[in-house]
Amino acid sequence: MNKHDSWVKLKPGNPYEPILNLFPDGMIPVHDPFPMEVSKDRKANLWIIDLERLSSLQANALAQIIATHRGADPLEVATEALKKGGFAMSHEWVEALECGPEGFQRSKELADFFETAPQPPSKLAWAEFVTGQVERWIEGNEEPPPINTIEDIDPRLRTPELEQRMKMNQVNKAMAGYSVFDVLTGRAMVDALNIIDPDNVYSLVGSDDEDFEDDEVYE
């Protein structure tokens, strides 16, 4: 069962710009945890766009635009994608990779493999690793551990940008359900800060939660 949850953000000026409006937030789904492959002539790094996570509209648009740039027939491009399980895209256009829980877990396992396998890894060792990944994650029902905070992500995979995004997600979750009044007075933000930064204590200046009632503002 295909459960990939990795996407790529493309660089400005990429040849896919005319159709990026078909993809939510311009993010294109790719295979994981090792979506990048090497071309047969070993001269190019290719990302494989995940065919199973594309709508028919997205798949047709990709086939058309790739065919235009190659000077090929769209049907030929689509047939090639079916054989590979996705469309090949040059690494030069990829700006960033984003993962969900499975992508992070499988990336961790990939990092573990490279740290523990003899260097360079033999073809047999690599084949065994890939086979295990397919059996557990694609054909099997392996479930990744949930990711709630940056601490749930392997340190080798963390970046300052990811940490900032995780904090913002925590803030948004913590503030969900608060009234407009609580947001405007800062109470929602204070509570959110106390959740995401437990080492410090935040409070509203000049207010006492035990004595202060929302209704008093309108008296």
Image (spheres, rainbow, N blue to C red):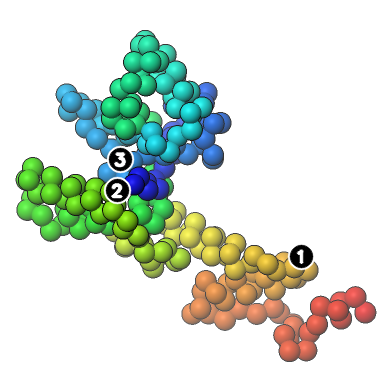
Q: CA distance from mark 3 to mark 1?
A: 43 Å
Q: Is residue 115 above or below residue 54?
A: below
**Label 3 – label 2 distance at C-alpha:** 14 Å
Pointer 1 residue: 180
Residue 205 quadrant:
bottom right
Q: Are marks 3 and 2 in contact (CB under 8 Å)?
A: no
The residue located at (86%, 79%) in the rendering is 215
Label 3, on which residue?
35
Q: Secondary structure at mark 3?
A: loop
Residue 83 horizontal/vertical position (percent): 28, 27
Instruction: Report if residue 91 is visible in the image.
Output: no
Instruction: Give the residue type at disc 3.
Output: Pro
Q: Is residue 23 visible?
A: yes
- Rendering quarter of residue 44: top left
Q: Nearer the viewer, mark 3 or mark 1?
A: 3
Residue at image position (64%, 66%) is 175
Q: Earlier in the sequence, mark 3 or mark 2?
A: 3
Which of 208 and 48 lies nearest the eye of the viewer?
48
Q: Quadrant of residue 69?
A: top left
**Kind of residue at badge 1:** Val
Say which amino acid is labelled 2.
Ile
Q: Tell me which numbered mark, 3 or 1, is placed earlier along the sequence.
A: 3
Circle 2 sits on which residue? 138
Please name which of the two marks, 1 or 2, marks the residue nearer to the observer: 2
For numbered disc 2, what is the local secondary structure?
helix
Relative horizontal placement of residue 15, taking residue 141 as reference (left or right): right
Quick check: 180 left or right of 55?
right
